[in-house]
Amino acid sequence: MTWGAGEARAGGFAIREQSTQAQGLSFAGAAAGSGGVSSMFWNPAVITMRPGFVSEQNLTYIGLSSTIRPAPGTNPAFAPLGGSGDIGQGAVVPAGATSYQLNDRLWLGLSTGAPFGLVTKPNQVWAGEAYGRSSRIFTLAINPVIGVKVTDWLSLAVGPNIEYFRLTLRQAVPIPGLSPAVYPSSFLKGESWGAGFTAGATLTPRDGTVLGIGYRSSIHHEIEGSIGVPLVALAPLAGQVRARLNTPEKLSVGLTQALSPVARVNVGFEWDNWSRLGTVGIVSTTRGIPVNNLPLNYKDGFLYAVGAEVDASPNLTVRGGFAYEVSPIDFANRSVRLPDGNRYIASLGASYRWSEKLTLNLAYSHFFLDRSRILAGLGRDYNVSNIAFAGVVDSSADIVSVGFRYLFGEPPAPAPAPLVRKY
């Protein structure tokens, strides 16, 4: 099991699991605050929706199952090595958010989590080893924000987003005269700190209706690292390297509409600008010349979600949701490192109000992914020594999340009842 990283459960190598409450709705209405204080990830302006000093902490287990089977068209020398086995790695992803009300108009907030992550590990010896033996991406983001309740119906928030990024990639190195079953491995690893910002707004045109719009900017990373190779003959490719990578910006729109005092419906839309990644060039730090590249060439990603929740009792809320995600990865750019595809997300969740201060959250999601194909080799984005690899991918995921919300200090006093006079 890996702590803090997992095969991305949003398009590309993004991690959307930042709120237990929002997960129970398949993230519908997250930008409108359906995910509680943790909705700060999608829209920081939601902090003005919670009075007082409130903190939420979430812990999510991502259980991925994904296999790649070699298909006709694979190089005959590699096909007998067989499939990848299950490349999925179980992972636990923590995330948290806190808001503090300074006065009637001003709030401070802080969210932390892993916005991107990837861990895939096929068999050490397999038919696609020249294109990947292991992949790991880890991130950590710290996002303080300030929120202002401009009017009773409009809130705005903005804040810096500081992000740590680390990657490690390994693959087999074809050596003439050696059997593919004994090829050694090379590695690429590096890390970086970068900064961007988040901003958002919530609008409450009438009681029971909340519209939220949130934005997470791209973050530029100057990744410093190294390439390691197994033979002296390949030494020109080794040594200290650098690469420039820009994470995708995210635009989120959410709507929450009360149907009755105890029932609400939520809808959501997300756009991730993955197409900005393109091909990531890897340059030798000492010689200043290109030595390799990562031809990601992703397309943009989109999420469409709908969900509903009902207050079954004063202390219990139940919810469910469904989402469809268009992945930025398709047959043109799919790799053995991240054999992603379009997905359907079905979710259930519940919140239990243990006391006036403590609320417990639980959610479960199942991801259905379309069966997909991979083709690497001559004429494709991914090509190592013209070694052809064709594969068929079958994937699914089960995700369980637990969390809590705690209110520090005394609960806010309820609004006074309207004064009624008889004349």
Image: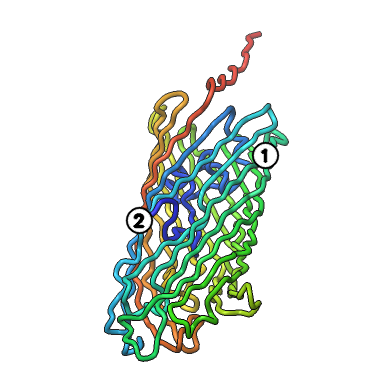
Residue indicated by mark 1: 146
Compared with residue 98, is residue 228 higher up or lower down, i.e. above or below? Answer: below
Compared with residue 349, is residue 340 higher up or lower down, i.e. above or below? Answer: below
What amino acid is found at the position of numbered circle 2 in the picture?
Answer: Gly
Going by the image, does 387 lie left or right of 97? left
The percent coordinates of residue 96 (x first, y second) are 50, 41
The percent coordinates of residue 366 (x first, y second) are 36, 55
The percent coordinates of residue 84 (x first, y second) are 32, 73
| Residue under the point 59% across and 41% down | 210
The percent coordinates of residue 94 (x first, y second) are 45, 46
Q: Which type of secondary structure does the marked residue at label 1 adopt? A: strand
Q: Nearer the viewer, residue 183 or 320?
A: 183
Tag shown at residue 90: 2
Query: Considering the image in quadrants, where does the N terminus appear?
Result: bottom left
| Residue under the point 40% across and 86% down | 175
Query: Considering the image in quadrants, where does the C terminus appear?
Result: top right
